[in-house]
């Protein structure tokens, strides 16, 4: 009997599967960081600086201390011992520089810097007392204005983060000559202000003081391992004395990639007072740490008369703080997307008196591709070519910027399938769509690209005494669906029904996990889970080989199938060994394997590894008011294997909404005189509401990739966002003839 | 400091006596005093909708109401709509349509959706979108949320 005739369970990978934590989320029984309620809990409320730069000269806390219920007030003069070296405050996602140290000394480095913490028996008492603290300062001059300081722009310092966020390659070809000779050219700017992540759950940490300097920390983070390392190293604690737990995170989008100040404050207070402490930021305080950097880009694109892109110049100037060089990969994308031979790239930072920027959904990619893909449409317009035709004419079969082949690339299929679903053949040249009432109509499209990143990760797989599977990893999930996907991968690898797999996660005592971000979680941690399960399978098989009576004979691993909790011999399918029999043979003990999956850098380095997408959108623009309505959009994605078609679709839908937000809604306004962000609440910081979202459609294009990782997945967290924003900008141009150069597009811009 | 007020709230069918200061919001009374953490705090300013509960039959933002203002009220929170294994049809529809990602806005979306269907003002998808727009979703599950509400409203889950 051949293997194919054996009863095979339907594979978990590639099917829609409800989230394993769904029922908890829809019933309000999922517990987030600020919802752990240990006994005698103290509530901490943060006081933020009201100057932008200078020194604290005094903190008057008498009135605050008189408030009933106030227990302690902490600040740089009243805190536990902290680390001396910069390295102690570094974390997995830290850029080069000197990380901010909360409560370290009297210096104020940015507006709204946290400078004191009031601890009280109730949240209300802490909040009220915080309002009574009077701080005096000695102020220094400051500068937060990007445009005024472009002359101070300089190259970023490079650190280990440059591995994940490569700097631009050196110029190649001769841009000036090619641009000068081009038959059609476009020169333009793209600008967006800072943006803030604004996850709906505000950052919070509940620390349980376990005695003898040990703490259990319920943190809002995108990496339990990262928070554990940061807290223990900054406060000089043993790693084993700090346990970080974060099973539910109410949105991250990058805001939890670095441990934020509330975690250190909560743990500091718990250690100082030997009590349980919760610190939750308020919404305004969600604007007091990392953010997407304000960035100004200049593009100069040139093409030949027959529509070949011949010259690309892409320059970007982004904000960073005075103390760290946060950088993104902004200008590298045109040379990967298009086979252009004459390229000039430049990316520079402008240090300002602000907090350090931080990765925010599709960092760099969203910013840079916005400039590239809007410029492509302007060139297509000058060439009187259809924008899709222009892109197909310049389709890259290999990565021109490095000369490497792509590990896989189905962008062409993205274009064709999305164009067909959308009805791109109905598109008319700029300004020629018939109006709908007083609304102008426009169609636009754009390409998207994101890196498929690979890192090492570790996981443990255990065959339990009941013959079921337990997998473990410190990984946590902010809603992307990782818990469910990891369980699916494990179920398939061991041939068990989904219900027989349990995943233990989000606890720093488990195997270390990278932070959850960069679209790499499924590929990175999924490969570790697969490797651990494979090793466990091997271990189970080795025991099966020596069972009494040798039922498997001299069969090897390829000669059997693991299915339904049994090992089945291909040569004689009546020979079935239940996992429970293996456990019994193992004297009733569970079997366990831990495995670190280390990607092969030499193999990976030979290829350019990207996910791709194409978005096609329709907008209506009110001719009098300039209001833009996104009526419908189709995004096709090529990102390797799709693990869970339901949660994958949701990831892309979410990305599309973020694209709408980038194009039409969100920005944080900075007062250059005060150095302060002004619209620090969800009424004035606009994100799309239900009424802003038109019909959204998602296509997953089939793509096979044997290079990127063992699972052939490229990740979905960012790619859905990237093509959407430029497609909307291009649709606005198609409707109105107005080139969008500032994001978000606002009514006054028409 | 003002002394605590004794108030009575009927929460999810259970009558509760509470001793609260006048400045305690209904949201904090539910979360901190009754340990009903299903109702979420997303802004504390009435801007995000995460704290939506059903109070005397109407959806209200619990962060914009002081607990003392609601003395004697009947309140339904997400915990009262359904529990694991005994879901409200809209909770079930949220699972079916994957109408959530991080889950933080979800209780507010569901309470708001249940009340919206009860109110009966919205008939079309566009009207549902408009009348749900006080509930923000940062993950971008918007279209799935509206799909779930439309399915229940149109009887697919009755």
Image (cartoon, coloured by chain):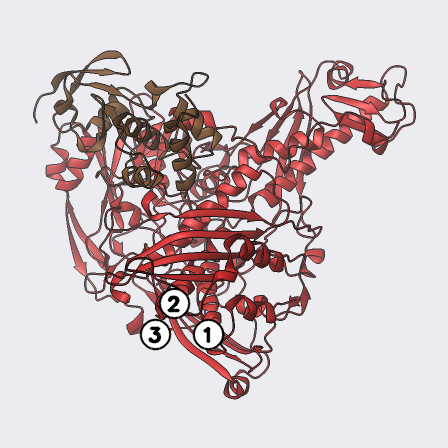
Quarter of the figure with residue A711? top right
Above/below status of A268 relative to A330 = above
In the picture, which chain is brown? B
How far, Cα to Cα, is label 2 from label 1? 10 Å
Which residue: 47% across, 34% down?
B98
Give residue B120's position: percent from left, percent from top: 27, 28
> What residue would you read off at disc 3?
A150
In the picture, which chain is red? A
| Quadrant holding the N terminus of chain A | top right
- Would you say residue A26 is visible in this rendering? yes
Above/below status of B134 relative to A425 = above
> What residue would you read off at disc 1?
A381
> What residue would you read off at disc 2?
A733
How far, Cα to Cα, is label 1 from label 3? 31 Å
For the residue pair A329 and B152, the one nearer the viewer reads as B152
Q: Chain of mark 1?
A: A
Q: Chain of mark 2?
A: A
């Amino acid at each position: 009997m051949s293997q194919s005739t054996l009863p095979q369970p339907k594979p978990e990978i590639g099917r829609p599967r409800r989230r394993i934590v769904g029922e908890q989320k829809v019933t309000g029984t999922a517990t987030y960081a600020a919802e752990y309620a240990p006994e005698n809990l103290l509530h901490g409320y943060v006081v933020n600086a009201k100057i932008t730069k200078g020194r604290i000269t005094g903190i008057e806390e008498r009135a605050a201390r008189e408030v009933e219920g106030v227990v302690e007030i902490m600040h740089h003069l009243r805190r536990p011992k902290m680390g001396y070296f910069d390295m102690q405050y570094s974390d997995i996602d830290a850029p080069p520089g000197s990380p901010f140290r909360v409560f370290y000394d009297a210096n104020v480095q940015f507006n709204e810097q946290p400078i004191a913490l009031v601890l009280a028996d109730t949240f209300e008492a802490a909040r009220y007392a915080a309002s009574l603290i009077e701080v005096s300062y000695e102020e220094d001059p400051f500068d937060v204005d990007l445009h005024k300081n472009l002359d101070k722009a300089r190259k970023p310092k490079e650190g280990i983060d440059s591995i994940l966020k490569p700097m631009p390659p050196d110029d190649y070809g001769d841009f000036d000559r090619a641009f000068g000779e081009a038959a059609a050219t476009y020169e333009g700017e793209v600008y967006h202000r800072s943006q803030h992540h604004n996850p709906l759950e505000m950052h919070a940490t509940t620390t349980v003081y376990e005695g003898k300097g040990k703490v259990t920390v319920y943190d809002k983070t995108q990496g339990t391992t990262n928070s554990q390392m940061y807290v223990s190293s900054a406060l000089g604690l043993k790693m084993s004395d700090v346990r970080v737990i974060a099973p539910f995170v109410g949105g991250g989008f990058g805001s939890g990639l670095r441990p934020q100040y509330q975690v250190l404050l909560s743990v500091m207070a718990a250690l100082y007072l030997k009590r349980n402490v919760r610190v939750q930021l308020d919404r305004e305080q969600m604007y007091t740490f990392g953010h997407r950097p304000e960035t100004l880009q200049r593009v100069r694109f040139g093409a030949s008369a027959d529509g070949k892109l011949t010259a690309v110049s892409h320059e970007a100037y982004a904000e960073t703080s005075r103390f760290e060089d946060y950088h993104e990969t902004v200008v590298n994308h045109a040379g990967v997307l298009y086979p252009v031979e004459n390229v000039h790239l430049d990316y520079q930072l402008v240090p300002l008196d602000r907090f350090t920027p931080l990765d925010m959904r599709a960092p760099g990619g969203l910013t840079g591709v916005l400039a590239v893909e809007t410029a492509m449409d302007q060139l297509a317009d000058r060439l009187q070519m259809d924008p899709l035709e222009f892109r197909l004419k310049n389709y890259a079969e290999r990565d021109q910027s490095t000369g490497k082949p792509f590990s896989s690339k189905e962008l062409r299929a993205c274009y064709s399938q999305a164009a067909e679903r959308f009805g791109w053949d109905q598109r008319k040249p700029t300004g020629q769509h018939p109006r709908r009432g007083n609304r102008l109509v426009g169609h636009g499209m754009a390409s998207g690209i994101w890196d498929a990143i690979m890192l090492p990760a570790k996981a443990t797989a255990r065959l339990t005494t009941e013959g079921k599977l337990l997998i473990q990893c410190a990984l946590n999930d902010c809603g992307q669906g990782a818990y469910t996907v990891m369980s699916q991968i494990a179920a398939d690898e061991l041939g068990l029904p989904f219900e027989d797999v349990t995943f233990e996660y989000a606890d720093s005592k488990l195997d270390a996990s990278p932070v959850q971000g960069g679209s790499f979680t499924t590929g990175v941690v999924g490969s570790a889970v697969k490797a651990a399960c494979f090793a466990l399978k091997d271990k189970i098989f080795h025991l099966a080989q020596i069972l009494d009576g040798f039922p498997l004979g001299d069969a090897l691993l390829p000669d059997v199938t693991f299915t339904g909790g049994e090992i089945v011999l291909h040569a004689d399918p009546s020979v079935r060994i239940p996992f429970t029999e293996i456990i019994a043979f193992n004297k009733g003990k569970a079997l366990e394997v831990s495995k670190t999956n280390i990607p092969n850098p030499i193999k990976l380095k030979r290829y350019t590894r990207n996910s791709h997408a194409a978005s096609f959108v329709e907008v209506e623009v009110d001719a009098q008011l300039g209001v833009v309505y996104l009526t419908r959009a189709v995004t096709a994605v090529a990102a390797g294997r799709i693990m869970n078609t339901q949660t994958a679709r949701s990831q892309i839908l979410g990305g599309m909404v973020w694209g709408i937000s980038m194009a039409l809604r969100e920005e944080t306004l900075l007062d250059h005189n005060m150095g302060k962000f002004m619209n620090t609440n969800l009424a004035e910081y606009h994100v799309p509401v239900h009424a802003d979202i038109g019909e959204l459609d998602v296509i997953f294009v089939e793509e096979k990739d044997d290079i990127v990782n063992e699972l052939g997945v490229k990740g979905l967290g960012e790619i859905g966002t990237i093509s959407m924003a430029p497609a909307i900008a291009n649709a606005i141009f198609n409707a109105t003839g107005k080139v969008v150069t500032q994001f978000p597009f606002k009514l006054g811009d028409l | 400091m003002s002394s605590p007020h004794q108030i009575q709230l009927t929460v999810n069918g259970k009558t509760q006596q509470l001793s609260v200061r006048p400045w305690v919001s209904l949201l904090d009374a539910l979360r901190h005093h009754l340990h009903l953490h299903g109702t979420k705090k997303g802004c504390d300013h009435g801007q995000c909708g995460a704290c939506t509960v059903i109070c005397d039959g109407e959806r209200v933002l619990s962060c914009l109401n002081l607990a003392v203002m609601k003395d004697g009220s009947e309140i339904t929170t997400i915990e009262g709509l359904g529990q694991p294994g005994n879901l409200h049809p809209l909770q079930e529809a949220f699972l079916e349509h994957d109408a959530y990602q991080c889950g933080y806005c979800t209780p507010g979306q569901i309470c708001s959706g249940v009340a919206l269907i009860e109110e009966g003002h919205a008939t079309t998808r566009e009207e549902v979108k408009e009348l749900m727009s006080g509930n923000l979703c940062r993950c971008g599950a918007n279209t799935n949320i509206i799909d779930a509400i439309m399915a229940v409203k149109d009887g697919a889950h009755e």
